[in-house]
Image (spheres, coloured by chain):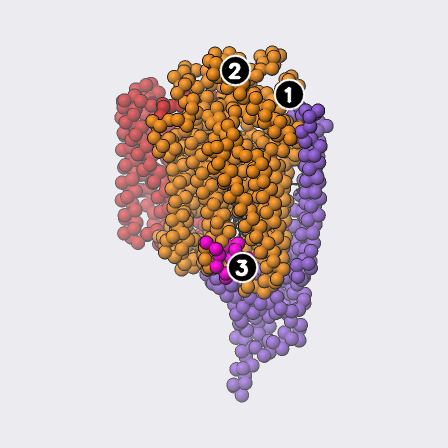
Chain colours: A orange, B purple, C red
Amino acid sequence: MATAAPHAHDHGHDDAHPEESWVIKYLWSTDHKIIGLQYLFTGMAMAIIGGYFAYAFRMQLAFPGESVPTYGVVSPAQYNAMVTNHGTIMIFWVAMPVLIAAFGNFLIPLMLGCDDMVFPRINRLSYQIFLLSALVLIASFFVPGGGFGGAWTSYPPLSSEAGYSLTPLGSTIWLLAVALEFVAFLLGGINFITTTMNSRAPGMKYTDIPMVVWMIVLASIIFMASVGPLIAGAIMLLFDQNLGTHFFDPTAGGDPLLWQHLFWFFGHPEVYVVLLPAMGIVAEIITTFARKKLFGYKTVLYTAIATGILSFFVWAHHQFVAGIDPRMANLFTATTVLISIPIAEMCFVYIGTLYGGSIRFTTPMLWALAFIFEFLIGGVTGIFLGASGSDIYFHDTYFVLAHFHYTFFPIAIIGTFAALTYWFPKMFGRHLNESLGKIHFWGTVIPFNMIFIPLFILGVGGQHRRIYSYEHFPELFQPWQQDLRVMATVSLLVMLVFQALFLMNFFYSIFKGKKASKNPYNANTLEWLADSPPAHGNFLHLAEMPVVHRGPYEFNHPDRDEDYWPQWLPPEGVSAAPPADPEPAADPEPADESADQDADQDSDQDSDEESAS
Amino acid sequence: MFELLDLKQGSSYAGDIDQLILMITIITGVWFLLTAGMFFWLLFRFRAKKDESGQYVTGDEPQLKRWVTWPHMLILLCDIAVIVMAVNVWYTVKQDLPEADATIRIIAQQWAWTFVHPGPDGELDTPDDIRTVDRLYLQEGITYHYKLSSVDVLHDFSVPIFRLKQDAVPGREITGWFKPTVQGEYGIQCAEMCGIGHGIMGARLILQSASDHEFWIQSNSPTPVAQVTGQ
Amino acid sequence: MMGKPIATTRTVMGVSTGKLAVWWLIVSEIVIFGGLLASYVMHRIGHPEWAASAAHTDVRIGGLNTMVLLTSSLMAVLAHAAAGRGDGPLAAKRLAVTIGFAVMFLCVKAYEWTTEISHGYTITASGFWQFYYVAAGIHAAHIIAGAIIMGFVMMQARRNHELGRVELIGLYWHFVDLVWIFLFPLLYIAK
Ligand code: HEA
Ligand code: HEA
Ligand code: CUA
Ligand SMILES: [Cu+2]
């Protein structure tokens, strides 16, 4: 392509570009990869805030009334505010920005073989609005009256009347931040969807699209189709708070349940909005490290679509005992329990992918496998809640809490670590330290189970949510229960220590890690054709933009000697001597390019040996 | 499993709910164990080995596809079983309202419970009603209707030993039922976020024998006091 | 920074990227208005007494504004036709007329709301009025935003730049118009 030529050489080595000012390059960039990294780092910073809140309120639960190191004594109002904002942050400022926006931005253009998103400036705007929303949220902790404490679900009348919540400014600013975040994601979503629809590399059929791209796009569509009513609801709530309307105020003809419907009509699809990208990430990783084709590409796709559609008809399972017509519960029990079918099928396909594989237990693979296992626990416990009869008992207990941490934690934390360790070489051009990575893995997954299994038990024992101290409930303040609480908190402390290890590994490796080749895992998808890290424009410096010849998971294909078959290699390479170079055969590039490829090959073998051990 | 956790079955339907929970535990537990077992076995069996490379399997081969389609059908069956059992229990607890022996009123507010018991006449909303705060006195073995309301925000009337939960919604009066089957003193919780005091909004449930309860009514009813002063 | 990325110029679906994006934008807007109107309809059914409030809306003014918007949509179509023939200046003129109608719509609305508020029908007056102001208000915000964007498109079209955008803003404009077609009967006619 003609446009490629002028870019042939000036983006080769990214690090040394003093003439592009740092601000332009990293803060005002329209490059999808930089925007992806911006989302990633913002999400990580928010994860630390959300994790810190978890630390502070879990300390309070284990040692009620005692001063928490680095925080102080936790008052009931502060407890509520921290729980509320922990939930809000983890979902809206960690799970979504990292899984969808960070990896969506980074991966979609690369995997589709184009040079950027279709609307780079809208993309930048989306991040800027997102950043603003994060700052607005943080500001809400410091206003007079303190941060909002009415739970992340923000049910009115508590959230709509300052007289009830006692946080007049906190509630409004919290709501504004959430609304801004929605706008950022609508803009981002339009970009993801249109880019994937219109800008695929030539030859890429819809069954050639890597699963993670499909999943992020489906997630964006589900988000877009479900968030609208809540945006309308947020405007009504904002007016109730500040203009004296009574949309949700029963004393003046309003209805508090209206908010619940609007919220959960979005809130339930939202859980699949974060689930699907994580599922996509896992699909990429298990195929690569099992050296296996995905077991039924179309099955995964259809089950994801089925999940998405069904997710719009289950919302009232959060409201079984909320005062809705009890007959409605029967309907929603049926839809809710049936959603286990597509999700189970998706899990089975992933497990089936392992069949006949040649599985290498690298760090990303460990994370991906842990995701499947832990998510199964979260999924099956959802059935206890979907069954209306048992939800009468479990509703708003720690059983629910443990259920959704067993889904969210695998998604937002385990899934993120899977993606981060897998694409790290592509993002930063260097490798993370494998052994530290494995230590971090076990140091996260084992404590994770030790936090939430005790909470499951407490939940079955009747412990209810959002309580700053159980001393006012004698049945819930027995020694064995307090012991379990301490156990959960201590496990959290252990986990946090290992996160510090991760952060060290992460930042050290960005600058000092072992250099990565273009395709360190011998994977097939197009991002591995680009440099590590890819220059601005991704493939523009190649002689041609990539063309796709086959599906993304052609590992161990019988027609080929090597165990992988990249999407970009033309079919002529089949019978010819093993095509060492990942570039198209007709590549007229100069010598330094092929030297690069040699290096590729060497380190490819290295990494193979490494992972086999 | 609830016995281990010091949690009695205190209402006529607590056993139904526990039964349902047990059934779901078995169904999903079996599935979980099978799935996880298969998962770990595959991980072990197909770990990378020097002499064995991976196979090319698309997932469309009929003899392999069975491994996904059969479970699909079986899960559908299990789902239907779960739905039927769940709806059954739900109907008993929430939809079907058996004839009441007595009716009480429960009023939630930030952050206390007010209970209105029918006085000696057995009728609610008469002058001899007994109002208490944060203590609910009930008689074992008879069927109660409750009328639940809230004066400010959402609360939730939760009685773990009854396995009962019901939100209190301002502007509505929600009627439900229960039938205590044990005696003793137990906890009542507010299980819906209701503001700063949500963490202290508990109450005590005192389940009495018929004679004890009769005695309590007699000694707490406002009417006898009025009669005493009248004489 | 460079010009348009290659990604933007690809059209795998055979539809221009801009048009796809506008359609998705419209989808996201449909659910916003859908949620709002569904809430309103449910409440309206549950509160027959709102009809008393609704009786005070002015069907003639609402009808006038309906005509204004329909005409503006027609002008947007004509602008698109002009742009399709490559006649940017004419398209710009027609867009200017469309904007003129948008301003007229807003003036009528301002007059209408002032009258109503001065009669005491404020946003807090009743359940009906709060939905009335919120729904019509969000719609009016879309009119304002649409008119501003149309201004930019018009400036470009005058210099024969980006004529494709004339169609895109037209699509959006028809959508905003269509929302009003739902609002008008729900807020004005249903008494
Ligand atoms: C990403 C997160 C995520 C995911 C994926 C899920 C998945 C599911 N959730 Fe969960 N849920 C939450 C996040 C999530 N949830 C959150 C955050 C809340 C609380 C919100 C709050 O109140 O603050 C919540 C609350 C919640 C409730 C309300 C509880 C209450 O408040 O009373 C219910 C009730 O139905 C429910 C059900 C389900 C079901 C049926 C699934 C299903 O999708 C699970 C399907 C998967 C499987 C079933 C596993 C695989 C299948 C097999 C191994 C086969 C065997 C299975 C059978 C035979 C059935 N969830
Ligand atoms: C994605 C969602 C998510 C995640 C990951 C978590 C993570 C954790 N949660 Fe959270 N939680 C919620 C969502 C989440 N939570 C929600 C929605 C609620 C309900 C709120 C409400 O009721 O309103 C809730 C409520 C909640 C409660 C209930 C409080 C109450 O009801 O009184 C508790 C109690 O123990 C708890 C504990 C924890 C703990 C110990 C972790 C730990 O796993 C946290 C560990 C910390 C980290 C993992 C961060 C550090 C990591 C890094 C620095 C690495 C870099 C990060 C990236 C690369 C992303 N959570
Ligand atoms: Cu009342 Cu919580
Ligand atoms: Cu849900």
At 64% from the left and 20% from the top, the residue drawn is: A557
Q: Residue B37: x, y in percent?
A: 70, 39
Give the quarter of the figure containing the N terminus of chain B: bottom right
Q: Residue B85: x, y in percent?
A: 68, 50
Give the foreground label among 2 and 3: 3
State the residue position of label 3. Answer: A63
Residue A557, labelled with which disc? Answer: 1
Image quarter of residue A575? top right
Crowd class of label 2 (few under 14; some 14 to 19; many from 20; radius 10 Å): some
Asked if residue C13 shows in the view, the reply is: no
At 66% from the left and 55% from the top, the residue drawn is: B17
The amino acid type of the residue labelled 3 equals: Phe
Separation of residues labelled 2 and 3 (CA atoms): 63 Å
Label 3: chain letter: A
Q: Residue C154: x, y in percent?
A: 29, 27
Q: Residue B126: x, y in percent?
A: 53, 73
Q: Dot 3: what SS? A: loop
The amino acid type of the residue labelled 2 equals: Pro
